[in-house]
Image: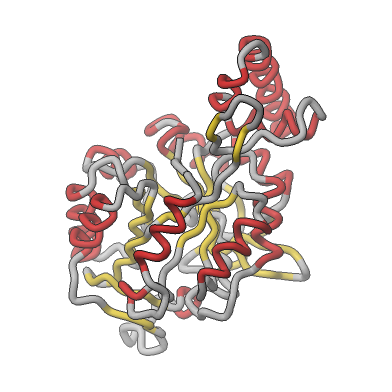
Amino acid sequence: MEINSLLRHSFMDSQSIIARSSSNLSSLCRISHSANYILQKKGFITVLPIRCSKSRYSIHCAAGFRPCIDIHKGKVKQIVGSTLQDLKDGGSDLVTNFESDKSASEYADLYKRDGLTGGHVIMLGADSPSISAATEALHAYPGGLQVGGGINSDNALSYIEEGASHVIVTSYVFKNGHMDLQRLKDLVRIIGKKRLVLDLSCRKKDGKYAIVTDRWQKFSNVYVNVETLDFLAVHADEFLVHGVDVEGKRLGIDEELVALLGKHSPIPVTYAGGVTTMADLERIKVAGMERVDVTVGSALDIFGGDLAYQDVVAWHKKQGSAVV
């Protein structure tokens, strides 16, 4: 009943926007992402993209690149996320693809120089060195980075005050296998919907994509599908989705998941997992109908891989994409 009520409110908002925007094509670019999807489903328009550049007769969609900074024990690393565990022996089963001699703030400076926005700073553990490194990155690029890892209603606002554009949340909302709607509402009350990114990272289970929590070790009973995306979009500004089955393994992307996100996400969404080549970026662009951004980690040369970071930046700029 609550989901249906929230969706009805969203549709009413979209009708109000249509009334104000119908006489001016350029104003379509300012329609909320939630309204975009509802308009498509109701048949008013065929396509209304998330990001658009105007011409006299058309609106152009564009995918984009979102950079990342993964921090483990204060160091910038690339780790196979599915091997992260709370191990008493200190993590002997952890699979690390790369450990950088550069600080998190140096990567933040790089992304700032290249004009890349909406990047993710992820703390793979809530230890003091990781929190300090993340905070330094936020200070180096205030407003240009999102931060996740151990975020809750007690500390979310402090990260915004330190310079994060958004906070990224998973386990705090999807607790013990279930969605805790009260916690979600508390976060929105404290920082506002426009500051919240929900991490819906998922793994295949019985043919469906189940959201996983607690360092991707625990399956929830919440699945990434049209109903979940519609409902959660009411409470968040963006989604971040790691394809956990392929993340960090450089084995290729999860095209089925990308296609699901491109077709059904009502708000901006970023996919991560399995990117190895420039061709993978194009596959995401096509499968996601130019509505899904992409994060690349282990494959990049700045993280010890073979894919040139500058080539990915050039691809991003060629798309004409800008997070709005």
Q: Horizontal placement of 247 versus 163: left or right?
A: right
> Residue 234 placed where, x, y %?
59, 33
The part of the image, by quadrant, that contains residue 252 is bottom right
Q: Horizontal placement of 110 versus 32: left or right?
A: left
Q: Inspect this view and state whether residue 86 appears.
A: yes
Q: Residue at x 54, y 38 (%)?
A: 51
Q: Residue at x 45, y 54 (%)?
A: 316
The part of the image, by quadrant, that contains residue 301 is bottom left
Q: Inspect this view and state whether residue 85 appears.
A: no
> Residue 310 placed where, x, y %?
35, 64
**Number of numbered labels in the structure image:** 0
Q: Which residue of the protein is positioned furthest toward the right in this rendering?
A: 43
> Residue 183 placed where, x, y %?
49, 42
> Residue 154 placed where, x, y %?
32, 43
Q: Is residue 141 above or below residue 190?
A: below
Q: Which residue of the protein is positioned furthest toward the front in this rendering?
A: 56
Q: Is residue 155 above or below residue 109?
A: above
